[in-house]
Image (cartoon, grey):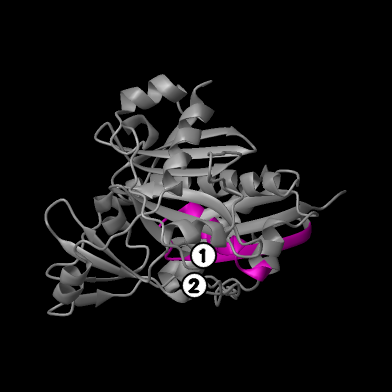
Amino acid sequence: MRKKYVVVGSLLVFVSLVVFESVFEGQIAEWFQQNVSIEEETLEVEEASTFVVESTESHKELLPSFKEHERFIGLSSESILEEFGDPERIDMSAYGYDWWIYPDSNSSYMQIGIENDEVVTVFLTGDLRGQSLSLGQTYHEINDMLQFKEKVNVSSSDGGMYQFELTKEDLEMRPLGKVDDVWVQFYFDTYTEKLSSLRIVKDDVLIKQRPYSVSYRGAPPERPTFTDEEWAKIEEGNAKQIFDFTNMIRSRHELDPFQWEVKVSSVAYLHSKDMSENGYFSHTSPNYGEVSDRFERGDVPFMLAGENIAAKYVDGVASVEGWLNSEGHRVNLLHEEFTHLGVGVYREHYTQNFMTPWQS
């Protein structure tokens, strides 16, 4: 475990290098203008705010280069075990890989995606530092190095061609850049304009996730299918990851961590399921009423209660980054009086229920 910060620190160094994708850009753009299908991914987070950041011009022309142990992608599961030891747990994902969870402390958090004994994605956040980039650096500083783009071309391993189109909100909250042959998704806290976390992802996994609107030629990119039992495992993993990452964010803001509340998690799960099965997205259920009504129905006495909901994010940690950038949801995440949290996930619907218990 002593090697952990050395490796992660090395990993973050490479993202400070500038990447230009100009070699085949014109050819690919022309290709996409003919016979393409367009798929729009809608991310639903209520009252999400927008913070417009104008990028600065930079003409550095450094080509990225990094050693294999600095990139994670492609490393074997055996190598990960040698570097970091056994994960705290292994969670199933909705994309064919398993998340190996390494919550080192309330100030550092890492998820490593393993498929066929190989690393295909990594999510990093917390007290991690690199030489010229840190998780506290500003949007302006990082964009000055990487020049985030509205249209990004991605090739799959079977020769498929895809073009992601990022909205203005995408560019501000979660832009995508390529360093060498590895994609990096940057999550920013738009209230502080600082980097919050990193997701490093292999081409094929990025295409499966489709985190942005995408154009493609031919058949649409396929996602895995799961049984109800497998979905239950995926949902449980997402709920735990949301809880862990939320406490990571509270630690970042010098707040006490939430305590897990089982009954409240059941209330949250039922609301996520109700929204999914009945085709609505609201804090008010047509079947079970307001948050307070659902707490009472779940036999959960409380002094103070709150709720965050989200839908159609690629996974739980992505939904937390969305909540962090929405004023009302951010208030709940960073509320000093809330002490307990329950999380419920059903398919692509996510619910957090916050609570301060009734003191008898």
**Quick check: can you spot residue 254?**
yes
Q: Amino acid at mark 1?
A: Met
Is 68 drawn above or below residue 30 in the view shown?
above
Name which residue lies at 47% across and 41% down: 12
User: Relative to 63, is 27 on the left or the right?
Assistant: left
Q: Quadrant of residue 106?
A: top right
Contact between marks 1 and 2 (CB within 8 A): the answer is yes
Specify whether residue 223 is painted magenta.
no
Name which residue lies at 82% across and 53% down: 358
Q: CA distance from mark 1 to mark 2?
A: 6 Å
Is 118 drawn above or below residue 199 in the view shown?
above
User: Relative to 310, is 158 on the left or the right?
Assistant: left
Taking depth in this image into account, of 197 and 143 the one nearest to the observer is 143
* Residue 35 image offset from top left, x and y in percent: 12, 79
* Residue 332 image offset from top left, x and y in percent: 69, 61
Secondary element type, mark 1: helix
Residue furthest bottom in the image = 34
Is 295 drawn above or below residue 169 in the view shown?
above
Name which residue lies at 29% across and 51% down: 205
**Quick check: can you spot residue 226?**
no
Magenta-tinted stretch = 303-328
The residue that disc 2 covers is: 169
Taking depth in this image into account, of 58 and 27 the one nearest to the observer is 58
User: How many dots with numbers?
Assistant: 2
- Mark 2 burial class by Cα count in 10 Å: few <14, some 14-19, many 20+: some
- Mark 1 burial class by Cα count in 10 Å: few <14, some 14-19, many 20+: many
Secondary element type, mark 2: helix
The residue that disc 1 covers is: 173
Q: Amino acid at mark 2?
A: Glu
